[in-house]
Image (spheres, grey):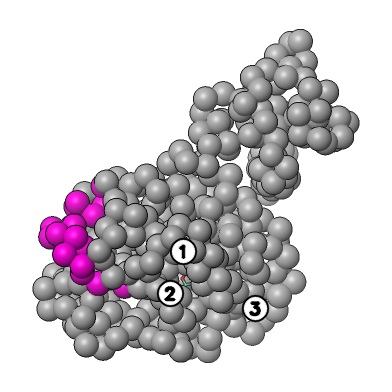
Amino acid sequence: MSDPERPLDPDLLKGYAFRVFGTMQGAVTAALIHLGDRLGLYLALAESGPVDSEALATRTGLNERWVREWLHNQGAAGLVEAQDDGRFWLSPEGRAVLADEDHPAFGAGMFDQLPDLMGVLPKLAESFRTGLGLPYDALGVEGARGVERGFAPWYKTFLVPTLIPAVEGAADRLRAGGRVADVGCGAGIALIELARAFPEADLHGYDISRHALARAEANRKEAGAANVTFHHAEEDPLPDDGSVDLALTFDCLHDMTHPDRVMHAIRGALAADGAWVIADIKAQPTYGENVEKNPMAAMMYGFSVLTCMSSALSEPGGAGLGTLGFHADLARDMTRAAGFTRFQRLPVDHPVNAFYEVRP
Ligand SMILES: C[S@@+](CC[C@H](N)C(=O)[O-])C[C@H]1O[C@@H](n2cnc3c(N)ncnc32)[C@H](O)[C@@H]1O
């Protein structure tokens, strides 16, 4: 197996081809998950209980033949349950992951951005030649919406009850009108959750994506959150006056062209007794460890090329850390280089992210 000179093995060939087309099966099923989410098919299945394609088509106002083929794909992929009488239904787990937008395990939102992710492939082919990637805004409004819906379930369920209490003194500071800076805030969901729980706090979001900032402002208005302000991070940067009590960077440092500069800016913004919470992917220092410890490593490296590393290389000289590039040792070293002296991992459970508390 490990001999690079060995001749082709017909049995291994079959297994290899099966693996290759397994990725194609995943890709086309992902496309059909996107359609199921977009067309309300999962919601309808969650509400209806066992239905045949005719009933599901009627319920959703769609064409029966198309719905039937969609159900056959979803059943064959093990995502919906199929009965012998031709009816299909969504299991409780299926409802949580694909239909219940408020469940912490909800994942269908991630598939929102699929067409835009695939749409940039021709441009990314050029990136492989030039070395220059694409910023988040290249993924359009739907790209920003996909990130928003992908990350929102965790913020809605765990940010206020679990993460904030894990940071010593944070809740008291927020109740006392403390200032928060969420850098790389995306569509602002984390800040809006904080605004609901801490109406006295002074909450600020910073991002460079105009699509994300537009979504953030729309979300802010809809939530009626008067104590949240969003800023374009380049035009209206972080204050350099030690006025921030709590800084947040959630799933974004590895996407940044110059995370070192952003860390220095956070150091300048943060009060001497303030805290900075980093959420970033549970990455390992080496490729081998990432593959060994992360069953989704191939997906992560794929996302890196399509979004994270691409964004982190979207300016000449970009750091290009990428999805699995910001491991704990690097986080510790980089925060120390930016002038922070204390670094600890927080005991917060998350399937994908690690949480670090950093202090001056
Ligand atoms: C994966 S998204 C995460 C967004 C948000 N924190 C969330 O969890 O939903 C990464 C975000 O980092 C933003 N970003 C990248 N470079 C940035 C920079 N230099 N300053 C501020 N935001 C940046 C991107 O525009 C994008 O919105």
Is residue 57 among the parts visible in the rendering?
A: yes
> Splitting the image into 4 quarters, where does residue 157 fall?
top left
Whether tag 1 and tag 2 are in contact, CB under 8 A, the answer is yes
Give coordinates of residue 163: x percent, y percent.
26, 52
Task: Categorize mark 1 by other alpha carbons within 10 Å: few (<14), some (14-19), many (20+).
Answer: many
Q: Could you tell which of marks 1 and 2 lies nearer the N-terminus?
A: 1
Task: Categorize mark 2 by other alpha carbons within 10 Å: few (<14), some (14-19), many (20+).
Answer: many
Does residue 351 sit above or below 337 in this rendering?
above
Give coordinates of residue 164: x percent, y percent.
24, 55
Q: Nearer the viewer, mark 1 or mark 2?
A: 1
Residue at 46% across, 38% down? 103
Residue at 76% across, 34% down? 60
CB of mark 2 near ligand 1 (< 8 Å): no
Does residue 20 sit above or below 58 in this rendering?
below
Numbered range of the magenta stretch: 162-182
Quadrant where the C terminus sits is bottom left
Q: Could you tell which of marks 1 and 3 lies nearer the N-terminus?
A: 3
Question: Label 1, label 2: how many angstroms apart (C-alpha)?
Answer: 9 Å
- Work out whether residue 84 or residue 326 is closer to the camera in this orientation and state it: 84
Amino acid type of the residue tagged 3 in the rendering: Ser
Residue marked by disc 2? 230
Question: Label 3, label 2: how many angstroms apart (C-alpha)?
Answer: 31 Å
Q: Secondary structure at mark 3?
A: helix
Looking at the rendered structure, which numbered label has been put on residue 127?
A: 3
Give coordinates of residue 326: x percent, y percent.
37, 67
Amino acid type of the residue tagged 2 in the rendering: Phe
Q: Could you tell which of marks 3 and 2 lies nearer the N-terminus?
A: 3
> Splitting the image into 4 quarters, where does residue 280 fall?
bottom left
Residue at 53% across, 86% down? 315
